Image: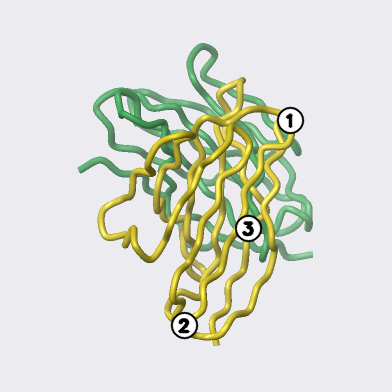
Amino acid sequence: GAVVSQHPSRVICKSGTSVKIECRSLDFQATTMFWYRQFPKKSLMLMATSNEGSKATYEQGVEKDKFLINHASLTLSTLTVTSAHPEDSSFYICSASTPNYGYTFGSGTRLTVV
Amino acid sequence: AQSVTQPDIHITVSEGASLELRCNYSYGATPYLFWYVQSPGQGLQLLLKYFSGDTLVQGIKGFEAEFKRSQSSFNLRKPSVHWSDAAEYFCAVVPLGTSYDKVIFGPGTSLSVIP
């Protein structure tokens, strides 16, 4: 139980285009989901907290207009990287808190902007 | 400043040897504590967590961790390491009293295992 599915696992896009990453809770409802970014050989940096039915809360230094987050249902949160540039290339991971108060993570999305 | 630290960036151990990965935190109140493991290019897997109660916590894959309030530490241990344990290990906390239950990660410790 408590599975978080993240899609796609890998994506390559051209500079200037937008990319959407989906994060789904498969067997539980997640009122809150979290989006992280991980640079190579680095730790996870929290980007934003996604709340179902309301605006996301972004961490300091994260551009909310570049990283659009939508949490339209209790099982789905999406992160859209708009007007992507090579410096946006990274590993993006979502997570959700589970009923037993653990935190389950998706398998991550490797974004490469060329 | 509030933080999670993992003093060892990289550790190498021989297969079959014991392992201890260190984690210290700096928060006013004891946060919730977690250890996660990440294989290359993969997501994170929860090894174990501590909220309250018994300070010695058992996890999956033969791992355990001990919470020591006096030292603000939550060190991860395994008595006998297997080659498949080679991965990145992250200590993480959920600070209490925050508006959102966000997980804050330490910098990570990379574990290499010598056959």
**Marks 2 and 1 in Cβ contact (< 8 Å):** no
Instruction: Name the mark on residue A27.
Output: 1
Q: The green chain is which one?
A: B
Q: Are marks 2 and 1 on the same chain?
A: yes
Q: Position of residue B82 (x, y in %)?
A: 78, 52
Q: Position of residue B25 (x, y in %)?
A: 35, 38
* Three-letter code, disc 1: Asp
Label 3, label 1: how far apart the Cα atoms are: 18 Å
Q: Which of marks 2 and 1 is in front?
A: 2
Q: Please identify the quadrant where the N terminus of chain B is shown.
A: top left
Residue indicated by mark 2: A16
Label 2, label 3: how far apart the Cα atoms are: 22 Å
* Three-letter code, disc 2: Gly
Q: Please identify the quadrant where the C terminus of chain B is shown.
A: bottom right
Question: Which colour represents chain A?
Answer: yellow
Q: Where is residue A92 in the image (x, y as percent from the top left)?
A: 54, 60
Q: Earlier in the sequence, mark 2 or mark 1?
A: 2
**Marks 2 and 3 in Cβ contact (< 8 Å):** no
Q: Which of marks 3 and 1 is nearer the N terminus?
A: 1
- Measuring 51% from the left and 39% from the top, which residue is drawn there? A33
Q: Quadrant of residue B39?
A: bottom right
* Three-letter code, disc 3: Gly
Q: Quadrant of residue A73?
A: top right
Asked which secondary structure carries label 2, the reply is loop
Q: Nearer the viewer, residue B59 or A59?
A: A59
Q: Mark 1 lies on which chain?
A: A
Eyeballing the image, is A112 above or below B56? below
Q: Nearer the viewer, mark 3 or mark 1?
A: 1
- Measuring 47% from the left and 31% from the top, which residue is drawn there? B33
Label 2, label 1: how far apart the Cα atoms are: 35 Å
